[in-house]
Image (cartoon, rainbow, N blue to C red):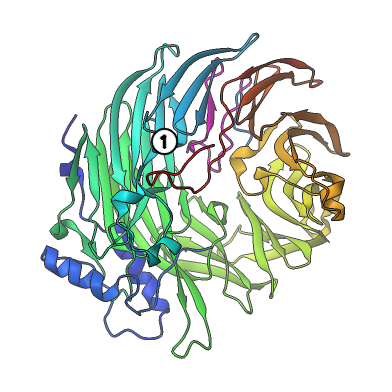
Amino acid sequence: MKALPALWALLVVGAMLGSLATMATTEHVENSKLIKFSSDLELRAFVMDRGPGSGRNLAVSGVMEDASDSSYSKTNVQVEGVDEGDRVKTDGTHIYIADGGRVHVIRAGLPMVNVSEMVIDPSGRSTVHGLYLSEGRLTVLYSEYASLSDARYGPAEMYYYPYYEAQRTCVRVFDVSDPAAPVLEREAGVTGYQVTSRMIGSTLYLVTEHSVWAYGSSNVRLPSLTAGGKDSTVVATEISYDPAMPQVSSFINLLAFDTSSGQAGSLSTLAGSSSVVYMSPTAMYITMQLWDEGRLGTSSRLTTSIYRIAVSGTDLTLAAQASVSGGPLNQFALDESGDRLRIATTTAWPSPTNEVHVLDLELKEVGSLTGIAPGESIYSCRFMGDRLYLVTFLQVDPLFIVDLSTDTPTVLGELKVPGASNYLQMVDAGLMGIGFENGSVKVSLFNVTDPRNMTEIDSFVVEGFSYSPAQYDHKAVMYAQGTLVIPMTYYGPAYWTGTYTYQPPSSSALVLRLASDGISEMGRIAHENATVDRSLYIGDVLYTISDTTVKASSLSDLELLGSITYGDGRTYYYGVDDGVAMAV
């Protein structure tokens, strides 16, 4: 494998993040531009002047598709052709499950069999964040953590810093052509914790971030790239920055790694914190938000800087930069369609409003719509072709349809219903929303054929008090051929009525049928003393996965066909034992 340090490009991403974000500040005298540090001393002086605690304005981060073939389901992703890492993956024959610092391989079918287990780090200091499965290769993303004894915290800092810190995010690629005997092919790593990742074909795109300070000390920690068991630190003269940036807090790193060849490319920078990341088949968009509290702190303004990084395999090119008012909710607030980028934002409190901005691929704004639902905030959005479906919330759930067929967006229709939807997806029977009402999970189905006369076809509200990961994690949603499966935790009537009688919560996979005439419950697949978080199907078998068990059920009537235990149900929390986060 080639020496990866030679692939480090001039570090531009985060500096561009800062350059446009500072346009929202009320005071700065320097114009935004990109230059390189001339020395290590200059970089460290810049960090000391504008790093966290310097007193300057602080840039902070902001707050399924039915993408399956006829034989088995795949991860529910935002953009077709752009895969997203998940805890569970399948190739239709085997199921791969991340479990703490391990990956379990289970042969599907009846009976299910535990065929192998990959221990990523025997020390227990690593946690697997995501898996990718492509062309007979399993790509494992995991973090390596520093111990508390290594961090050199002072007594006062114990109250303000986490008990452990992600030193680097690592990539391991295994040949799983024989799932019973996975073979490690190659590995790489980048300093910092994982912000997000994507995969196009065999190329992994990984974004990480780490503090400019080394473990809370006064030492600047430069980025490093890991290859072949060796670390190479990026020298200061390879790092770009923006002298107009009022404050820096992080190094942001982007690694493109071809899992089939081992080739890599990268970008990294001194910047503020990253926020929402969106990726199309040809570009990654990294955003950063900046709060400007005004000269006397009497007003505030929120802006978002957007950076378009063109990607082609491992080649990365910063193609454009811009800023818009407000901040995006999540990755679904951005969408690239043809030669346009659309982004939905909510402006700052105490008087929020919502906006839609249309930009060309040079990120020049060509149109916008402002003043949507004053006083409310965006709770979910979904771009679908020439339409944007947008949900805002204060006390009721207004669903808006925005026309994007021209560069001047317009509201086509609005419907108000109780509760709010956190996630939207078009299904066979209409527009589906997954959210909440009165403290419990709600699934809604809307007829949006005529935007000026939208109707709620039906809704399903889980009794008592409940929540679902599907409300905030789209990869927890499994939809296929009219069947919706989402994990659900239910607390029962004693908790709901406030009697304080202890009643342990129950976890199950909720299975609903969504049809043009309404929503009906098929049943719930319970996992005793475990927490369900994923589901998938292979053929006519539905597999529901908890932190201990995989259950196989008939997809047509939910008859239990078999089950297998793979883990011990470890629950992670912050604790200290020689500085390592303990798992119990």
Q: Quadrant of residue 127?
A: top left
What residue is drawn where x is 73% and y is 48%?
433
Query: In the rendered image, which quarter contains the N terminus?
Result: top left
| Residue 233 is at least partly visible in this image | yes
Residue placed at 53% from the left, 46% from the top?
A: 573
Which residue, given by chain and number where applicable, does mark 1 sit on?
Answer: 200
Is residue 208 within the magenta segment? no
Vertical comparison of 524 with 427: above or below: above
* 50 in relation to 498, above or below: below
Residue in view at x 69 percent, y 70 percent: 376
Nearest the camera: 85 or 514? Answer: 85
Closer-to-camera residue (334/505): 505
Seen in the image, is 252 located left or right of residue 71? left
Quadrant, the C terminus: top right
The residues colored magenta run 70-94
Q: Secondary structure at mark 1?
A: strand
Which is the main secondary structure of the residues drawn in magenta? Answer: loop
Residue 518: quadrant of the picture: top right
